[in-house]
Image (tube, rainbow, N blue to C red):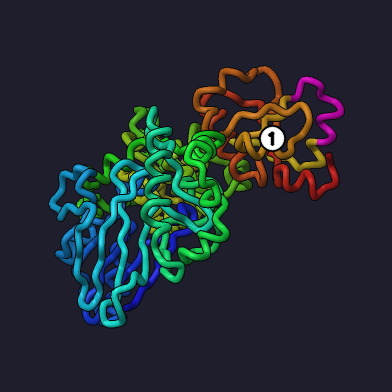
Amino acid sequence: MIIRQFFIPGIAHSSYLLGGVSSCMIIDPARDPDIYIQAADEEGFRITGILETHLHADFISGHLDLHERTGAPIYAPKSAGCVFPHIPVSEGSTITLDDCSISVIETPGHTPEHVSYIVTHMSRGDEPAALFPGDTLFVGDVGRPDLFPGRAHELASALYDSLHEKIMKLPDYCEVYPAHGAGSFCGRSLSAKRTTTIGYERRFNQILQIHDKEAFINELTKNMPPSPDHFSRCSDENRRGPALLSTLPPVRGISPRAGKDLMTQGACEVLDSRRYDAFGSLHIPKSWNIDGEMNFSTFTGWVIPPDRDILLAVHRPDEIPKITLMLHRVGIDRIIGYVEGGVWGWALAGHELDRVQTISVQELDALLKVDKELIVLDVRTGAEFAGYHIPGSVNIHWPDLRTRYSELSREKRIAVLCATGARSSMACSILKRNGFSNILNVAGGYTGWVAGGFQ
């Protein structure tokens, strides 16, 4: 039996190749089938099945793309009600992979339709060798049950039963291969460790130490991190079946003049994926700024409208394939092209440009001493803000500025900061889109503030 893990930074998603003698199955695939096809070729396997543990909320799955490329059948939870061709599985279903037997158990909680796959290597014995729990059990955490409005208590109760009555009945030596790691919004405190065992989690997972059911439910239905916008749409898109990547048009270069015409007509959104220092220096007016080197997929899924055409502004054209792939992962598929020459080409065409003044933490300290009207806007999460912040600062989480910008005065100067300067630049782009002009982005953010010796 061979298990290969594929980890995607940013969305912190893990998918797997489970191999037998000559065949393999792919579990919870991402939307880039090439990596699985290449891995199967390297191992000398034929892909004979695609297993989904649940309808993923945080990314668009690659099950249909992989099926198109390989012809392998898709196995999905029966209760998910998937409308694409698939083999429905439920409690007690068994799938055979060469000398491996894969048993299905229903493990609702993170989502209502969730299943987990228990693998037994029959040539070695009849004891479970590996568990693929999807988002039911993580290293050091469990799946969050609050993604369905009004059902958090119900799902937390189901999650307790799934964990304590099923998963934790497995032997300590059973290996666990979860679908996410640290950085994912599908839990609260996932470990950076990417695999585990039942015994390790039994001893060290703090949530599993809560044996009282009501206490468990209470713990998992309060103080959960915010959930990005795309969490509310990806599950249903995965149920219906996302568009095949092969059907999407290629991303082409668009001249600055044509791009300007599209913007004037209100026909597209401009997404600038450069770092905050470049965006602050010059950018196309009304563009969104989301740093392509940060948690790009999650942040774009959070705020970029999926029903609008997207025009990209990048530093170099060779970045386009990577940027496009990260957008596809969260269902941002309407990418009509990129600005030829980027912002530099836009400037050469004589089009209007905008900027955000970037200041150092020393300049912020000096401004605080002389400008009593200065608003310090901290756009980190509420939990980060509660841990430490500049006294007198205002906390609005950066995605919430899309609606809460009206709480701020356009007449006053606003210094925006996060932990580094990247999320605050995203916040500045939102404020710019809503008519704010007197804004400053604090380079280095609160990290630089503390490192500079300020309190």
The N terminus lies in quadrant? bottom left
What residue is at 31 percent from the left and 48 percent from the top? 114
Residue 365, image x, y percentages: 82, 36
For this view, does 181 lie left or right of residue 54?
right
Rendered residue at 55%/51% (across/down): 209
Q: In this view, does 86 lie above or below 172?
A: above
Q: Which segment is the magenta one?
A: 365-374
Amino acid under disc 1: Ala
In the rendered view, would you say 168 is above or below 352? below
Mark 1 residue crowding within 10 angstroms, few (<14) / some (14–19) / many (20+): few
Judged from the image, the secondary structure of the residue bearing numbered disc 1 is helix
Residue, disc 1: 386
Of 325 and 17, nearer the camera is: 17
Q: From the viewer's side, name the closer residue of 353 and 312.
A: 312
Instruction: Determine if residue 345 is in view.
Output: no
Against 58, is 42 above or below? below
Residue 97 found in image quarter = bottom left
